[in-house]
Each structure stands twice: as structure tokens, then as C-alpha cells.
Amino acid sequence: MIKKILLILPLALSLKVQAGDIRLLDTLFIHNASLEMLEPIEPSYLENITSARIWNGNWFLGISGGASAFVGAPLGCADLFNRIEPALSVSGGKWFTPAIGGRISFQGFKLKNSLLHKQSYKSIHADFLWNVLSHHYNTCNQPKWKVVPYAGLGIIHNEDTGNSPFAFSYGVTGQYRLSQRIHLNMELGGTTTFKDFDGRGASNRFGDNLMSLTAGLSFSIGKVGWKRVVDASPYIRQNEWLIEYASSLSDCNSLLAKQHNEDAESIAELKKILEIEGLLDSYKDFSKNGEKKNFSKKLYPKNDYSGLNSLRSRLQGLQWPDNSLNGDSIQGGKSPAENYVSGNSTEYRSSLQNYLTELSKGKSCIGAPIFFFFELGTNHLTDASQLVNLEEIARIAKQYNLNIKVCGAADSVTGTDDINRYLGASRSEYICSQLLHRGIDKNRISEVNKGGIDTYIPKESNRHTSVMLFLK
């Protein structure tokens, strides 16, 4: 059997080392994981790129008025200022991107030809618009200013001569945003067509020009503004990292599952050997709740209250002068002769009277202290069954209105002064909390911290908390 036990111990140690390696591997893996890649990404936007709106949003209507001047061929004798006439312009269009748009514009009223004769005209043209300040959309969704050169093609009609030739339109428009949907416009534009537009000149050559300067308002229709395009590269990098991370986690889980199966098989074999040797019941609590117990720890017997029971039996069995103590003893009624084994009864009564006096003044505790022993460096009891003593202490203290003194201590051999003071306080606080949980009034409990001591042998006995009962 000894040989088999020697075989079991290396096997158990091997399982312990393997389990420790697995935990270490898992801890290191999680520690090395980049937590930043697991955090949500704040969106960033591409520069100079917005999503185009082909049909919906950013439509506009404009109306403006001003002056126009006709410069034709032949030029005639009047200068430019003598040819100025009022002009009216109405336009409608759409911006497809912050930089590119289009419009249809109608313009008309009066003009003076080379002979300074007034003629009525109408012009309609489609223009290509280009906003040279579109890069400002990187910093604000609706910039204050727009500078928009344009060029287009249309038809201009002279109502007096009946001519309706093709015409080129060109110019530049400046816009200032008054509100989200209203802009102030100023436009300097020109129209060029064939020389016979005013009834004088060749019909196959360009030469008649109409210059205009107008100001007015434009109104946005529908949705206004642009949606910026989110930069997808950070999300792509995060997704690639998450795929690799998930793959590594899968590999780690496979490794742990394999190790778990091997450990389960080893434990099953170990259980068979223990069962054959008849040791299974002795080792069944070896891994209870996943916590390995240390078999080298010394187990301390439970306190059976023999001292307290003996004292109460003696006190209740004697006839005192004031007959103040009566009742049954905890272990059954005993006569004074049974409690008093040897010695002179007068001396015994005198000694007992002195002891009772000390008890009544609170100078001595009732019976012997009850000790609760703790594991090294913790406030965990070496054996949870010690708590049954607290049940009896609480019951007796409540029944006879006794006070309780709790003294915490630590082993001075295995710790520094600061550590031992902390352990003594922690252990006494634990016992006090258990007493409070069992219904003891907080005012009846006092705490004392002894810190590190070397009073008892073996040294493990110094890792304790003692509980004493007092009348006062």
C-alpha cells in the first residue's frame, strides 16, 4: 500500500503543477490583450469627401435684380454707362456636392443697341456651378461664404428683331449665408451671342455681349447640408485584430479543454486507487468546492464548555448567604460535595467568594476563554465547525445579560509588527461580526488587539481570537 501511496503523491503534485500552468497561461494571455482594440471606436471622417445627394436635398431658388449693359458690333458712339438698363434674373438649381452644382437661369428686361434704341430681350441658359470654397466643409457643415464661378449655354431672344440665337453664359457669383436656408447673392455675369442679335452685324460671328450686375436672395429647399463620409480604415483594422484575437482564444480554449480531459482521466485513476486502498472517504474533501485543503494543518478540538459548565454547577449548587444564586446546572444538579473534591470547605467557600467578587466587579472572566484559531496570514478559521461555539456563547450571553470581550492575536514569529496588528484586528472584527449576526448587542462587545504574540506552543496556537464572558 505504501508503494501505491508514493505513486499517488507525485500524480497529485503533477496535477497541481499542470493546473497552475494553465492558470498562468490564461492570465498572461488576457494581460497581453490590447484593451484599446476592444473599446468602441470614435468615428473619424475623410477629408474633402461627402456623400453625394443626387435627387434629394440642397435645391435652391434665387431671385435678383440689377443693371445690364449691351456691348455689340458695331459698337456705336455711346459708352458703357450710357447703355445701362435695369435687369431681372430668376434661377433654380441644385448642389450635387459641396463643390459642384447646376442651375437654370432666366434673365430679361431692356437693352440699348449700338444706335441707343431700347429693345426687349429674354435669355434662358443652363449653367455649371463650381464652389471654389468647398474645402471649408471639413471644418463646418454650412460655411458662411461661397464663391461660385459658372459657365453655361442657352438661348437669348430679341423681341423687337425676332432673333433667337444660341448664347454662352459665364460669370461669378458670391454668396453669404444669412440663415440655414437663406443666402444673399451678388452676381457679375455676361452673355455672348452672334453679332446680328440687335439687328446689325454678321449672323455667323460672335460679337454681341450683354454684361450684368445683380444682387438678390436665394432660398434652399428640402434637406440642407452634407453628410460626411466616415473613415472605415480604423474599423477594418479593429475587425482584423478581433478575428485574430478570436482565433487565438479558440486555440487557447482547445488547449484548456484538452488539458481538462487529461486531468479528469488522471483524477478518475487516482480515485480508483484510493477506493481500492480504502482511503476514498479520508480524501473526499481534498478538493471540495475547488479549494485544496492543507493536510499538514493541525486540527484543534472543539470547546465543550467544561470549565463554564463546571463553574455554573458550583455556583448554582452552593447555598450563599443571600441565596441569590439558584437554578439548575448545565450538566445537571450536583451537590457541593461532588464539586468540591479536596481541601477545607471553609477555604473553598472563601476562595469561591473572592472569585465571585471579582466576577461581580468585572475583573475576571467567567470560566476559561474560548479560542478560535485561524489560518496563516488570514482571518479564515482553520475549521468552520468552530463557529458552533459562537452559537452557545451568544445563547448564554443573551440569557444571562453577559458582556463579551474579544481579543485578536497573531503569530509574532511569522509576520512583521504592522502585519500582526492588522491580522489581530481583522480576526477580532470577524468574530465580532459573527456575534452581531447572532443577535448580541454591539454595546455588550469590546475588542482588544494583541498584535503578534508568542505565548502558546505550538506557534500556530498564537493565530487566534479569544472570547471571554463577563458579568460587567
Image: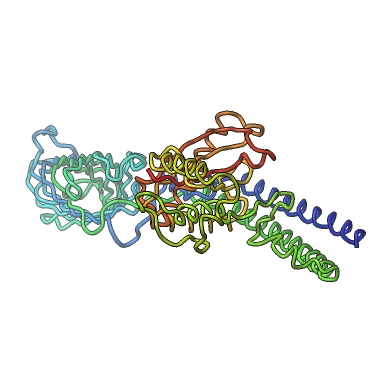
Q: What residue is at 46 percent from the left and 52 percent from the top? A: 315
Figure coloring: rainbow
Q: Is there any visible trace of residue 156 in the rendered image?
A: no
Residue in the foreground of this view, choosing between 299 and 70: 299
**Count of numbered marks:** 0
Q: Is residue 137 above or below residue 399?
A: above
Q: Position of residue 150 (x, y in %)?
A: 29, 45
Q: Position of residue 153 (x, y in %)?
A: 29, 52
Q: Is residue 227 above or below residue 415?
A: below
Left or right side of 457 for 470: left
Left or right side of 338 for 107: left
Q: What residue is at 33 percent from the left and 51 percent from the top? A: 226
Q: Position of residue 370 (x, y in %)?
A: 54, 48
Q: Farthest right residue?
A: 3
Q: What residue is at 73 percent from the left and 53 percent from the top? A: 295
Q: Quadrant of residue 281?
A: bottom right
Left or right side of 27 for 198: left
Q: Position of residue 149 (x, y in %)?
A: 29, 42
Residue in the foreground of this view, choosing between 379 and 20: 379
Q: Quadrant of the N terminus?
A: bottom right
Q: Is there any visible trace of residue 175 in the rendered image?
A: yes
Q: Quadrant of the C terminus?
A: top left
Q: Farthest top residue?
A: 417
